[in-house]
Image (cartoon, rainbow, N blue to C red):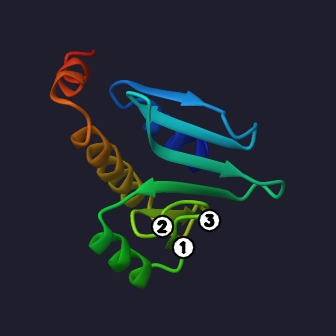
């Protein structure tokens, strides 16, 4: 399994995660309780980009430290980063960024929805 598939798998294994293609076949949207926490683009050259929600201060720091992390493509650039999945970042670092995005979105949900997610297997 290549790293891009591992990253997609990791997103989809999050409690309550669902995938949709509301923007066409080249943009996979991964949501929790109807709210997006990851957006994966594949272009015609097999270059993948991963958009993830991020705390604005952390987002800025990550962009300064890594050339492969940029302001969110087609997103609110303060709260979203785009990670170029070009192999320059360790997969475990990307998994940590996915965890952060997921956690930010879950924290924004109502208490009853958060509780129902935590009860999922």
The image shows residue 108, relative to residue 96, as above or below, that is above
The reply to whether dot 2 and dot 3 touch (C-beta < 8 Å) is: no
Gap between marks 1 and 2, in whole Å? 8 Å
Residue contact at pointers 1 and 3, CB within 8 angstroms: yes
Q: Are marks 1 and 2 in contact (CB under 8 Å)?
A: yes
Per the rendering, the mark at residue 68 is: 1
Q: In this view, does 67 lie to the left or right of 105?
A: right
Q: Which residue lies furthest to the right in this view?
A: 44
Q: Is label 1 or label 2 in front?
A: 1
Relative to 16, is 81 above or below?
A: below
Q: Residues within 10 Å of mark 1 (few under 14, many from 20)?
A: some
Q: Tag 2's secondary structure?
A: loop
SS under mark 3: loop
Residue at position x 53%, y 64% in the image:
82
Q: Name the residue under label 2.
A: 89
Between 41 and 108, the residue placed more toward the observer is: 108
In the rendered picture of this protein, how many numbered marks are placed on residues? 3
Percent position (x, y) of residue 94?
42, 57
Indicate the secondary structure of the residue bearing disc 1.
loop
Residue 69, horizontal then vertical, whole percent: 50, 72
**Quarter residue 47 falls in:** bottom right
Q: Which of marks 1 and 3 is in front?
A: 1
According to the picture, the residue beneath numbered tag 3 turns out to be 86
Q: How far apart are marks 1 and 3 (CA)?
A: 8 Å
Q: Position of residue 116 (x, y in %)?
A: 22, 18
Q: Residue at x 21, y 28 (%)?
A: 114
Could you tell which of marks 1 and 3 lies nearer the N-terminus? 1
């Amino acid at each position: 399994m290549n790293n891009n598939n591992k990253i997609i798998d990791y997103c989809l294994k999050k409690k309550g995660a669902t995938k949709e293609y509301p923007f066409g076949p080249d943009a996979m949207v991964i949501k929790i309780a109807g709210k997006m926490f990851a957006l994966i683009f594949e272009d015609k050259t097999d270059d993948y980009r991963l958009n993830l929600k991020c705390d604005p201060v952390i987002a800025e720091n990550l962009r300064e430290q890594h050339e492969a992390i940029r302001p969110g493509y087609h997103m609110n650039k303060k709260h979203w980063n785009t990670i170029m999945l070009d192999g320059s970042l360790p997969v475990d670092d990307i998994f940590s960024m996915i965890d952060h995005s997921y956690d930010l979105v879950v924290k924004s949900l109502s208490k009853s929805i958060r509780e129902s997610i935590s009860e999922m297997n």
